[in-house]
Image (tube, rainbow, N blue to C red):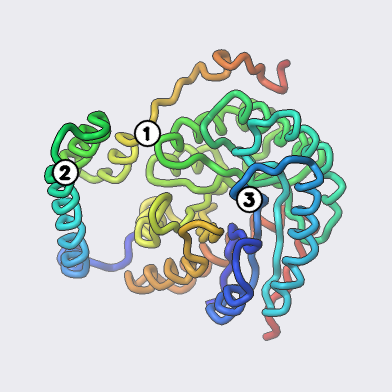
Amino acid sequence: MPANRTAAEVLEREYLLVRAKVLEIAASLDRIDRAGGEPADPARAAQLREGLRLLLADNPGRAEAAQALFSLPYDAGWRASFGLADPTHA
Amino acid sequence: MDYFDPHIHMVSRTTDDYLTLAKMGCVAMSEPAFWAGYDRGSVEGFRDYFEQLTGFEPQRAAQHGIQHYTWLCINAKEAENVALSREVIAMIPEFLGRRNVLGIGEIGLNKNTKNEATVFLEHMDLAHRLGELILIHTPHLQDKYAGTRMILDMLGGDARTDPTRVLVDHVEEHTIRPVLEAGYWAGMTLYPVSKCTPERAADMIELYGPERLLVNSAGDWGPSKPTAVPDFIYEMRRRGHEESLIRRVVYDNPRRFFSGCQRFEFRTRPA
């Protein structure tokens, strides 16, 4: 149920905000580079690079995809791993 | 616009915040039991906290015309201490007759551990046995997705669970769908850094519609904004959404969910 807005209107309203966020990310990456040496956590650095790549996808659902990138996996067998029985079938 | 904040920790806030919230249209709020910033050492610490939630806070809110409700539990961070958790769970029924108690919450997971899951199941059993509503905390950041799925497993694994009597809070883009598809209520928490922004919450209303969706500030002692719900209202208006849609999310939906508790006696403003 989007309100009655066109893509052009949304872009016009969001442009400066998104521009500012892009600059913040750019400055953060520069700051990391300036600090020199290896990143403290290479896995995190790689995760951020992958997150940026996700933004360039030409399809909706970028926010959900980014959330998935920053999430630990779900193990459907967690209950058995913990030795926790189903309370109604214990 | 009159609104509810269905999740806010007023024990951490000043009286000035009550005044500000009242001026911005907050007519009712619910305050889940949560972590105090340190692990409490005994069940008596929780008894004192529950006295504060059911005695002092409703009085403080009433001075500003706000109706204060609450939820009781031992939170997920302290659930690592299973023995203490069991003492607290055994003590909770002493407070369930208090007029501002809506149910059991915010129970949930934090780091998705066995102890947290054990205590979650025992809280859930208490709620089911006593016919109480349930308010659920889902984990933060990288633990949210797996933790939310584990919580849904535990809820769905108990035949007594009625999804219409459970609110799963702190949903985001990657967890909202499974929560709503399973028939539960879902809350979006508007937090400055983690969780969700007013803009993203408005996006999710546009994507999923207003059915069984709530927004809250979860204002507490950390970086948070108790006036985040008015920020959401403003964002929705800025996008051109109808007042009736906004009101449904910030007023009608929490009122409808809370009405599942027989102790909930909401008083509307005089016409």
Q: Does dot 3 land on a helix, a strand or a loop?
A: loop
Q: Does dot 1 land on a helix, a strand or a loop?
A: loop
- Distance between mark 3 and mark 1 Cα atoms: 26 Å
Q: Does dot 2 land on a helix, a strand or a loop?
A: helix
Q: Position of residue B26 (x, y in %)?
A: 59, 73
Above or below for A21 versus B64: above
Please check whether the numbered discs 2 and 3 fall on a single chain.
no
Contact, mark 3 vs mark 1 (Cβ under 8 Å): no
**Tag 2 subunit:** A
User: What residue is disc 3 on?
Assistant: B36
From the viewer's side, name the closer residue of B82 and B135: B82
User: What residue is disc 2 on?
Assistant: A35
* Residue drawn at (69%, 78%) of the image: B65
From the viewer's side, name the closer residue of A42 and B264: A42
In terms of image quadrants, where is residue B142?
top left
User: What residue is disc 1 on?
Assistant: A71
